[in-house]
Amino acid sequence: MSAETNGRTAKLPPTTPLRDLPPPKRPAPKGGEESAELIAQRDRLLEKFTVMQADLGGAFYEMAIRDHVRLDVLTRKAAELQRVDAELLAVERVLELERADAAGLCPGCGAPYGHAVRFCAQCGTPLVPTEAGA
Ligand SMILES: [Zn+2]
């Protein structure tokens, strides 16, 4: 009875060859897909903005309770936040333009407005519809 176990580890050949499989690329159909992409981008930016805003508030709080407010750090964080905010605004504008068939852009703030709108929803600027040849 010689139950001899030799500690040889069986080497299994790699069953799955490491190949670089390119991700299936589908040509994006025009229309809804682009909108969905924009909405996803908007959501990502919005989430980023929310996190950064909370981070900025938290940073200020930590500094304030230690009586050591570092304005340079806060200003830098605020600048980053502003950049994300601007990006977010740009995406939202494109989305709005796609969604509603905008009659034009507000002369006050640049937000798109619809046909039956008399005042800008963003800034309240009165929008006089220019009906050419009416
Ligand atoms: Zn406006």
Image (cartoon, grey):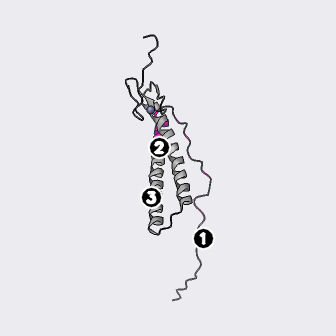
Chain part drawn in magenta: 13-39
Residue at 51%, 31% (x, y): give it: 30
Which secondary structure, mark 1?
A: loop
Q: Is residue 29 magenta?
A: yes
Which amino acid is tagged 3? Gly
How far across and how far down the image is residue 42, in percent?
47, 43
Q: Residue furthest top?
A: 133
* Tag shown at residue 11: 1
Q: Which residue is mark 2?
A: 42
Residue at 42%, 22% (x, y): give it: 128
Q: Residue furthest bottom?
A: 1
Residue at 51%, 51% (x, y): give it: 81
Residue at 44%, 63% (x, y): give it: 61
Residue 103, quarter of picture: top left
How far across and how far down the image is residue 87, in percent?
52, 43
Q: Which residue is mark 3?
A: 57
How far across and how far down the image is residue 55, in percent?
47, 58
Q: Residue furthest front?
A: 67
Mark 1, other Cα within 10 Å: few <14 / some 14–19 / many ≥20:
few
Q: Earlier in the sequence, mark 3 or mark 1?
A: 1
